[in-house]
Image (cartoon, rainbow, N blue to C red):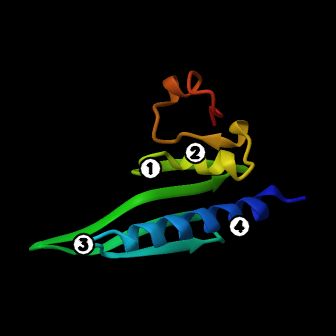
Amino acid sequence: MDTRLNYRDIIKKILQEHAQYRASLPDSYNSQVLFDDERGRYLVLDIGWNDDKYLHTTPIHLDLIDDKIWIQYDDTEEGIATDLLEAGVPKEDIVLGFRHPKIREYTGFAVA
């Protein structure tokens, strides 16, 4: 079975849940999910106004690279890796891309 197809579904479900949660917060902004299945890129994008300050940020960025889920950026409290593990993704298929390559071997997750 092509694990990337399964991982795509898992990623989409988790990101949609995060976007819905973020949009429900008081003083919320528009939280969108962006999926690029062809290139294996997945984002949550927050856009809106906080008083007089314009907000345009990407709190979650995941990529599918060589059958592994790369967490490129994670600005969540519990950590997106926790959600992936709870969804059944093994640690050896999760890469903490935001960690320096020399440090990844000590994280308990995949190195690359």
Within-10-Å neighbours for mark 1: few <14, some 14–19, many 20+: some
Q: CA distance from mark 1 to mark 4?
A: 19 Å
- What's the residue type where badge 3 is placed? Asp
Which residue is identified by label 2? 81
Q: Which mark is residue 27?
A: 3
Residue 28 in view (yes/no): yes
The vertical placement of 61 against 48, above or below, is: above
Q: Which mark is residue 74?
A: 1
Q: Position of residue 2 (x, y in %)?
A: 85, 59
| Mark 1 secondary-structure assignment | strand
Picture quadrant of residue 27? bottom left
First in sequence, mark 3 or 1: give its number.
3
Which residue is identified by label 4? 9
Q: Which mark is residue 101?
A: none
Q: CA distance from mark 3 to mark 4?
A: 30 Å
- Outermost residue, left direction? 52
